[in-house]
Image: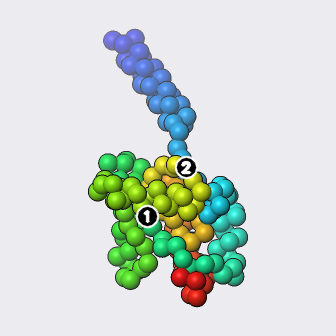
Amino acid sequence: MGVQIQSYKYSGIIFIVLSVLALSTFPVSATIFSENGSNVTASDLYNLTNSTTIVPGNISPAFFFDPDCGACGPSHEYIEAYVADHPGIDLHVVNLSTGNESQDLLNAYYGTYNREWMNIPVVFIGPMGLEGTDEVINNFDGLHSWYESHKDSKNT
């Protein structure tokens, strides 16, 4: 009996170790990118959002998600709560499962931001974009607030 319990204990430990290894190597996409298509660092984003740079206000901020996307759930909940807390916010929330029109809109943003493809969830705000759950949740508020206060109202 003692040998059988010991065997289950080691099997459990091996399972946990393998699970952690599998999850740590699972590809996850979290990217901050600029309108010219290049990836930027969190430090670059911080420097931008703490600057007085005026940017054209000609791009409507948009958040793209799919309800069948597991990674989209937390960021969609965050965005919905943010929108509820900020009535009148300038943000298009686009459900990609609604058909070709929503996919065409995403493709138009790809062209504007010089990206061939990307993972969802993704948000485009002014000259920057945030791809991935963590980037959206951690950086949306600061980037959107900065954009709204620094966009050139003559160029909207």
Q: What residue sits 32% from the left and 48% below the top?
A: 68
Q: Amino acid at mark 1?
A: Phe
In the depicted view, which residue is nearer to us: 88 or 12? 88
Badge 2 element: loop
Sequence-first disc among 1 and 2: 1
Q: Position of residue 19 (x, y in %)?
A: 46, 31
Up-down relation of residue 46 to residue 19 (above or below)? below
Give the spatial CA distance, label 1 vs label 2.
17 Å
Q: Is residue 67 above or below residue 155?
A: above
Residue 38, disc: none
Q: Residue furthest left?
A: 98
Task: Name the residue at 55% across, 63% down.
Answer: 112
Height in image: 139 above or below 3? Answer: below
Identify the residue at image location x=67%, y=76%: 50
Say whether residue 141 is visible.
no
Element on which disc 1 rests:
strand
Amino acid type shown at disc 2: Glu
Is residue 40 something one can see in this rendering? yes
Q: Position of residue 24 (x, y in %)?
A: 54, 37
Q: Quadrant of residue 101?
A: bottom left
**Residue appearing at x 29%, y 56% in the figure:** 98
Q: In the rendered image, which residue does mark 1 sit on? A: 63
Q: Residue 116, which numbered label?
A: 2
Label 2 neighbourhood size at 10 Å, few (<14), some (14-19), many (20+)? few
Is 91 placed left or right of 98 in the picture?
Answer: right
